[in-house]
Image: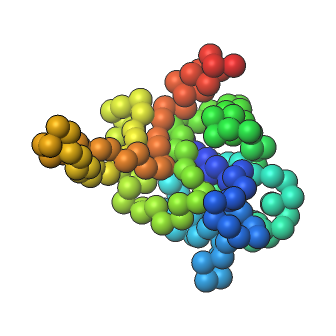
């Protein structure tokens, strides 16, 4: 089974307030993307696509060749939206016979190996796997306390590659 990981790293990080985009901020010796790549389960992904601006590759991802021994690392152009960035990355994967793809937000470096493995395992039975955290949101409605169970969607999100690619293609 050929699994691929897409890391969306085209954001500007405006809300983060730094001089560089959040995903290129250092945590110790590594930036967020390098941290993700250092900590993903070895041999889980045959291909990794990083969606980011070309000048960011040269400026912030100087150690990217260190990961080439684990996986094939490709780059795609970010789009104006998350959807467009995702589709650009999927187009890079299309000729490579990818079975499953996980799409991850580069600003979330602390994804656990356990979660990644669980998503890939569940893709054997489902076309998509989207992790979430449930929390209770309390509201007062007509002086009665109502508790809503809210699902906070997480990344990475896993998909059957061909179905996701076709869905994106239909939206063009």
Residue at image location 59% in from the left, 70% down from the top: 35
- Horizontal and vertical percent position of residue 67: 67, 65
- Horizontal and vertical percent position of residue 99: 53, 34
- Horizontal and vertical percent position of residue 94: 67, 31
Q: Quadrant of the C terminus?
A: top right
Residue 92: in sight, yes or no?
Answer: no
Residue 17 lies, with reference to residue 71, above or below; the image says: below
Residue 111: in sight, yes or no?
Answer: yes
Please name whichever residue, 125 or 136, is drawn nearer the observer in this view of the structure. 136
Residue at image location 62% in from the left, 16% down from the top: 170
- Horizontal and vertical percent position of residue 111: 46, 61
Q: Quadrant of residue 123?
A: top left
Please name whichever residue, 11 or 37, is drawn nearer the observer in this view of the structure. 11
Please name whichever residue, 5 or 54, is drawn nearer the observer in this view of the structure. 54
Residue 19 lies, with reference to residue 87, above or below; the image says: below
Residue at image location 68% in from the left, 67% down from the top: 17
């Amino acid at each position: 089974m050929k699994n691929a990981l897409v890391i969306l790293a085209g954001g500007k990080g405006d809300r983060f307030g730094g001089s560089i985009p959040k995903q290129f901020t250092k945590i110790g010796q590594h930036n967020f993307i390098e941290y993700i790549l250092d900590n993903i389960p070895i041999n889980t992904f045959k291909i990794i696509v990083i969606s980011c601006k070309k000048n960011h590759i040269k400026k912030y991802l100087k150690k990217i060749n260190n990961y080439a021994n684990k996986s094939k690392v490709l780059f795609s152009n970010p789009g104006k939206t998350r959807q467009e960035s995702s589709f650009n990355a999927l187009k890079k994967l299309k000729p490579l016979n990818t079975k499953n793809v996980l799409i991850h937000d580069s600003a979330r470096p602390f994804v656990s190996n356990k979660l990644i493995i669980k998503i890939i395992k569940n893709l054997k039975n489902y076309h998509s796997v989207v992790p979430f955290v449930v929390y209770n949101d309390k509201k007062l409605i007509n002086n009665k306390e109502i508790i809503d169970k809210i699902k906070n969607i997480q990344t990475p999100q896993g998909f059957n590659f061909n179905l996701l690619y076709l869905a994106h293609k239909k939206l063009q």
